[in-house]
Image: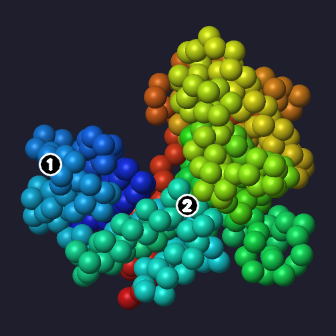
Amino acid sequence: MDQKSAVLVMNAGSSSLKFALFVAASDECIGRGSITGIGTKAVFVAKGPGFDGKTLPQVDDENCTSPSEGARLLLEWLDVIMPDMNLIGVGHRVVHGGDLGKHTIVRPYILAYLKTLIPLAPLHQPFNLDIIEFLQQIRPSVPQVACFDTAFHTTMPNIQTRFALPRIWHDKGVRRYGFHGLSYEFIAGRIKDLSPNSYQGKTLVMHLGNGASMCAMEGGLSFSTTMGFSVIDGLIMGTRPGALDPGVILYFLREAKLDEPAIERMLYHDSGLRGVSGISNDMSVLLASDNPHAREAIDLFCLRITKDAGGLISLMGGTDAIVFTGGMGENSGEIRAQILNSLAWLGVTYDMEKNVSLAHGEEAMISLPDSKIQIWVIPTNEEVVISRHTHAVLTAKH
C-alpha cells in the first residue's frame, strides 16, 4: 500500500460534518476540518499539511443543504486537490452499535440493524447513517466502516449492564450500553504509554464536553460507565439532564399532559446546563456570567460528577489515575479545580498554577508528587481511532 493511500474519517451531525484524512496504515493526519452551520449559514474549514494553502470550496444554502451534500462537496474537493490519492475507505463514527461489539464494514443487513437503534440515539444515529447511505450512492466502490461508540464498553461485566426490570426486557436489549467509547479507547492507549502502572491498574476517565460521561477502567478495559441505555443518562450535559427519576417522565405524561415529542425535545435540547442556567449550554459563557443561575448550573454539573466519581471509584476499590478529556475536561482549569477540590478526600493534590495555565491541546500530568492519585489532562482524538479501525477492518477482510 503506497503513501498515497488514505482513509477518510467522517462524523455527521444534524447541521455539521466533521472530517479528517489520514495516511493509510498510520496515524499521520493529512488534514482535518468541518462544515458547520449547514442549513443556515454553512462554513467550510480545513487545516493540515495536505490542506493548507488550497482554495476551499464555496458552500452556501443552495449547494450545501445537508451534511450529505457537504460530503459530496468534500469528496469533489479532495479529487481536485489530491488527484493521485487512493481512498481505500471511509470510517464513520456511529454512536450506537447495539449488540455489535466490533467495528464493521457497512453491509445492507448491518445498516438495517443500525437503523433500529435510532430511537436510542435520535440526536446522532440518523445523521450518522444518512451520510453512509448517501456515500453508498455516490461512491459505491469505496468501502465504508462503522465504528461504534458503544463497542469499547462490551467488556463491562454483565451485572454492570442490567436494569432492575423484568428479565425479558434485558433480553430484548433494554440494558446499559455506554457511549463515548472511541474517546475512551484513545485515552486508554495514551495512558498505556504515559503511565503504564495506571493503565495496568485502575483509571477513572472523565469525558466532559457538551455530551459528558465517565468511565471506570481496569487494565485499560471498560468496567463501568455513567451513560446507559441512551445518551441522556448519567452526568449533566450541555442540553441533557443526565440521570433522572423515571417518575418525572410519568408526571410529564399524566399531570403536565406533555406529549412524547415535547418530552423528547426537553430531554435532548432544553435541559442540562442550558435548562438550569436559562442562559447557555456553553460552559465558557456560564463561567463568565455573574447570573446566579449560571453559577447554580456549574455547581450542579460538578456535584453530579463528584457523586458519580465516588461511586465508580468505590466499585473499582480505588483508582490510580484520574484523566480529564473532552472540551471542558481539556480546556477549563476552573472546572477541573472545582471537581478535584471536591475529591480531596481521595488524597488528591494538584499544581494549581499548572492547572490553569495549560495551553489549548496540551497533554500534561497536573498532580503533585505527594498526590496519592495521578491527575492527567489528555486531549482526545476519536478520529485517529476511527482511522486505525477502518484500516484494520478493511485489511482483515482479505
Q: Is residue 355 visible?
A: no
Residue 66: x and y in percent read 30, 57
Residue 200: x and y in percent read 73, 55
Taking the image as shown, residue 91 lies to the left or right of residue 99, namely: left
Q: Is residue 86 above or below residue 59?
A: below
Mark 2 Cα shell of 10 Å, populated few (<14), some (14-19), many (≥20): some
Foreground mark, 2 or 1?
A: 2
- Amino acid under label 1? Pro
Taking the image as shown, residue 123 lies to the left or right of residue 74, namely: right
**Residue at the disc numbered 1:** 57
Q: Quadrant of the C terminus?
A: bottom left
Quarter of image, res 171 = bottom right
Q: Quadrant of the N terminus?
A: bottom left
Indicate the secondary structure of the residue bearing disc 1. Answer: loop
Residue 108: x and y in percent read 43, 86
Residue 204: x and y in percent read 73, 46
- Amino acid under label 2? Pro
Gap in Å between the C-alphas at discs 2 and 1? Answer: 30 Å
Nearer to me, 3 or 9: 9
Q: Is residue 229 visible?
A: yes
